[in-house]
C-alpha cells in the first residue's frame, strides 16, 4: 500500500468512526487534521463529547466494533474505558477521544493543537468524496490516454499439405451395383442368343 493509499484508508476509518459518534448522539464532534511536523505518528484526532459515562462507553465500544467488523482494524491501545470520563482509542494513524463535556472543556485539546486544521464530519466527508472523485477521474483519463493495442489478426488457415488426400471411397457401392446388374443382364443375353439361333 502506497503512502497516498494508506492516507486515504485512514480517512475512511476516521469517517466511519465520526459517523458512529453522530449515530450515538455524540456532541460537537470534530476532526483535527494534525500538522505532520507537530503530530508525531497520528494524522487525525477525532473528538466527541458524551453527556454521561454510559454514553461515552457506548460510543467507544461501537467505534471499536464497527472498525473491527468492517475493516479488520483493532486499536493499538484503549485507555479510560472504566472511568468513562475520557476514553482514548489509539489506532496509530488516528486517535479517537470520547470526553464527558466537562473533561473536554478542562483539557481543551483543540486549543493545545493550534496547528491542526479543525473539520466537522460533514466537511471531512465532502473533502474525502472530492478526493476520491478526483482520483477516479485521473484513473479514467490515464486509461483513455493509453494507446489501444492493435486488434489481433484472424488466425491463418492451415497450409494445405503437399500430399493429395485420398478420395472418399463412396464409389465402391456404385461399382458393386453395376457389377451385379451386369451379371443379371448376362444370362438374359445368352437366352436371347439361343432363341435367335434356334429360329435359324
Image: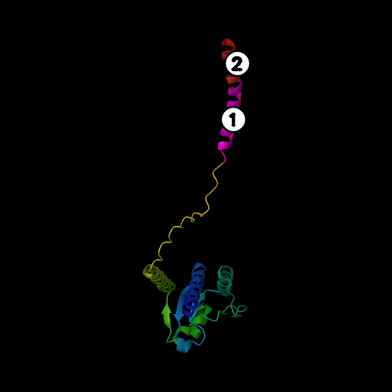
As drawn, the label of residue 179 is 1
As drawn, the label of residue 194 is 2
In the rendered image, the residue lying farthest to the front is 200
Disc tally is 2
The stretch drawn in magenta includes residue 179: yes
- Name which residue lies at 44% across and 73% down: 121
As drawn, the label of residue 6 is none
In this rendered view, identify the residue nearer to me: 92 or 152.
Answer: 152
Q: Earlier in the sequence, mark 1 or mark 2?
A: 1
Figure quadrant of residue 61: bottom right
Q: Position of residue 47 (x, y in %)?
A: 49, 78
Judge whether 132 appears above or below 97 on screen.
above
Mark 2: give few (<14), some (14-19) or many (20+) Cα within 10 Å. few
Residues shaded magenta? 169-188
The answer for how far apart the CA atoms under marks 1 and 2 are is 23 Å
Q: Position of residue 190 (x, y in %)?
A: 60, 19
Does residue 194 appear left or right of residue 42 in this picture?
right
* Disc 1 to disc 2: CB gap under 8 Å: no
Q: Quick one: SS at disc 1?
A: helix
Magenta span: predominant SS is helix
Q: Quick one: SS at disc 2?
A: helix
In this rendered view, identify the residue nearer to me: 82 or 131.
Answer: 131
Quadrant in which the C terminus is drawn: top right
- Name which residue lies at 60% across and 28% down: 180
Q: Position of residue 184 (x, y in %)?
A: 60, 23
Judge whether 61 appears above or below 188 on screen.
below
Amino acid at each position: 500500500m502506497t503512502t497516498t493509499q494508506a492516507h486515504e484508508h485512514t480517512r475512511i476509518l476516521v469517517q466511519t468512526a465520526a459517523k458512529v459518534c453522530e449515530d450515538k448522539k455524540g456532541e460537537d464532534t470534530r476532526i483535527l487534521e494534525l500538522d505532520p511536523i507537530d503530530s508525531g505518528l497520528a494524522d487525525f484526532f477525532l473528538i466527541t463529547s458524551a453527556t454521561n459515562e454510559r454514553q461515552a462507553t457506548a460510543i467507544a465500544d461501537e467505534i471499536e466494533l464497527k472498525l473491527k467488523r468492517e475493516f479488520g482494524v483493532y486499536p493499538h491501545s484503549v485507555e479510560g474505558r472504566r472511568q468513562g470520563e475520557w476514553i482514548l482509542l489509539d489506532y496509530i494513524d488516528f486517535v479517537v477521544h470520547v470526553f464527558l463535556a466537562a473533561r473536554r472543556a478542562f483539557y481543551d485539546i483543540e486549543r493545545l493543537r493550534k496547528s491542526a486544521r479543525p473539520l466537522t464530519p460533514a466537511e471531512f466527508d465532502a473533502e474525502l468524496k472530492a478526493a476520491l472523485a478526483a482520483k477516479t477521474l485521473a484513473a479514467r483519463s490515464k486509461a483513455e490516454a493509453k494507446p489501444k493495442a492493435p486488434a489481433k489478426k484472424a488466425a491463418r488457415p492451415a497450409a494445405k499439405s503437399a500430399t493429395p488426400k485420398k478420395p472418399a471411397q463412396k464409389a465402391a457401392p456404385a461399382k458393386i451395383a453395376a457389377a451385379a446388374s451386369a451379371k443379371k443382364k448376362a444370362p438374359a443375353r445368352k437366352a436371347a442368343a439361343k432363341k435367335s439361333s434356334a429360329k435359324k
